[in-house]
Amino acid sequence: MKLLSAAQMQELDRQTIEDVGIPGVVLMENAGRGMAEHIIERFVSLKPGPVLVLAGKGNNGGDGYVIARHLIESGWQVVSLVLAARDAIQGDAAVNLNVLEACGGRVLFATDVAALEQALAQQTETSLVVDALFGTGLTKPVAGLYAEAISWINRSPSAVAAVDIPSGIDASTGQILGQCVSADLTVTFAFPKTGQVSYPGAGFVGELVVVDIGIPSKVASQVGDESLFVTRQEARSMLPVRPQDGHKGTFGHLLVAAGSVGKSGAAVMTSEAALRGGCGLTTLACPATVQPVVAARLTEVMSAPLADVDGEVCLQALPDLQALTSEKQAVAIGPGFGLGEQAAEVVRRLLAECPLPMVVDADGLTALVGHLKLLETRQASLVLTPHPGEMARLAQIPISEVQENRVVVARDFALRYGVVLVLKGARTVVALPDGRIRINASGHAGMASGGMGDVLTGLIGSFLAQGLEADRAAVLAVFLHGHAADRLVAVHGDAGLLAGDLIAELPAARQALNREE
């Protein structure tokens, strides 16, 4: 599903109005009528209200006037409160304000906090608030009168419907601009926006509905795939072909370099996930100290012992590890690999010298902190899979900055270093080396448990070994990872799900994805 930034949506509007000749007031009418229809359907139990439409002075407020008029015509009790002086409303918004008033709509105006508080004090029986304060063009923190209005909305027990986007969310990134409205329903226009499906903004959107407002297909078809919300349809199209006459060699051989004393489980889960993801063969290279342990647990995975010191791989293991890359199609390295300097140097040397596609996670990412120049000289494709803490260490920024700007941070890193960057978390962001963004639609909070990242690493490695390009391997693995968890919600809910449960579900989840209509 294509996602738009605020600038892209503004350009679509401009082309529709200026180049095609459809008046802006027509688009506003279509938007407001479409949202009113969804409000009537979604909040039928609240009819006849009262409804309070809180409107700004721009076009988002204009949409609100149209919504108010259509709700009134459908028998709802509506009051519109405009946070501006009457003569400050201009253009298409003024046209629809005039129409609303001519149709008998009740409209109040508040230009300061005292007037706002006085008007809101009269709305004690309001059952639904329509947020028409700011649209997708907001770029600076909310302040003053508007901040007071948003605080009131969020304190109110009323249901909330947001016009286009909850006011206070950056439509392009999902960043919260000071504070934002928490909505139960958001009706957006023409296309969903990146900020509506990206956290933290996504947590305030509620149910998201897209309404067609009449953007001509000639204009809409120009929207590219710079940003996509990855749903079943996109993921299904990436599944590798499984020829009927294939054999284990057909489906790739993955080398997993993982594990250390106390972290052998990470090596096991990564390897099992690789096979469950469809890889034909998997070889696990791990410290000799733990090799008997993992070999006993992994009956379908080959294992190779590596020289170690105190249970972690040491530099003496590097020649053997490099030799093991022969006749493999991809490498997954890092889960449970250890944090010692020798293990870290093995990661760095293999990354610099191995010509195979590679996915790096966990301790492997820690080894790269302060050594990012290695990424700039690597020729073969590389996927990095940090969680927010690891991302903060790699980029040398606070975790709060990562979480507040997930799309921007991931895109900037991927562009700078030419890697596929998988920023894990709710609505995992996959940033591609050319700046494109993929935001994952699958998964739930039950995946917040140990070992889930190891499973994802094995899945990405599996798809790399099966011949997928790094971008498709990462995007598909992230979706299938969450899709398997979604299928287990009925059994496990959103707590108590183990990585092993998810691994066992992967083949069925893949098959269901492949067959779903």
Image (cartoon, rainbow, N blue to C red):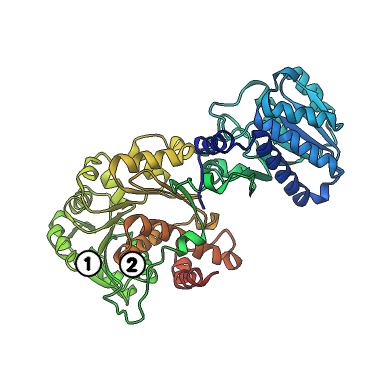
| Amino acid type assigned to the residue bearing label 1 in the image | Lys
How many numbered discs, if any? Answer: 2
Task: Answer yes or no: is residue 217 visible.
Answer: yes
Q: According to the image, label 1 marks what residue?
A: 328
Determine the CA span between mark 2 and mark 1. Answer: 14 Å
Q: According to the image, label 2 marks what residue?
A: 271
Counting other residues with Cα less than 10 Å from the Cα at mark 2, is it few (<14), some (14-19), or many (20 or more)? many
User: Which numbered disc, 2 or 1, marks the residue closer to the eye?
Assistant: 1
| Amino acid type assigned to the residue bearing label 2 in the image | Ser
Residue 310 point in image, percent of width and height = 22, 56
Would residue 235 appear left or right of 120 to someone viewing this image? left
Counting other residues with Cα less than 10 Å from the Cα at mark 1, is it few (<14), some (14-19), or many (20 or more)? some
Q: Nearer the viewer, residue 176 or 74?
A: 74
Q: Is residue 128 above or below residue 140?
A: below
Residue 435: name its quadrant.
top left
Task: Answer yes or no: is residue 392 visible.
Answer: no
Residue 168 point in image, percent of width and height = 60, 32
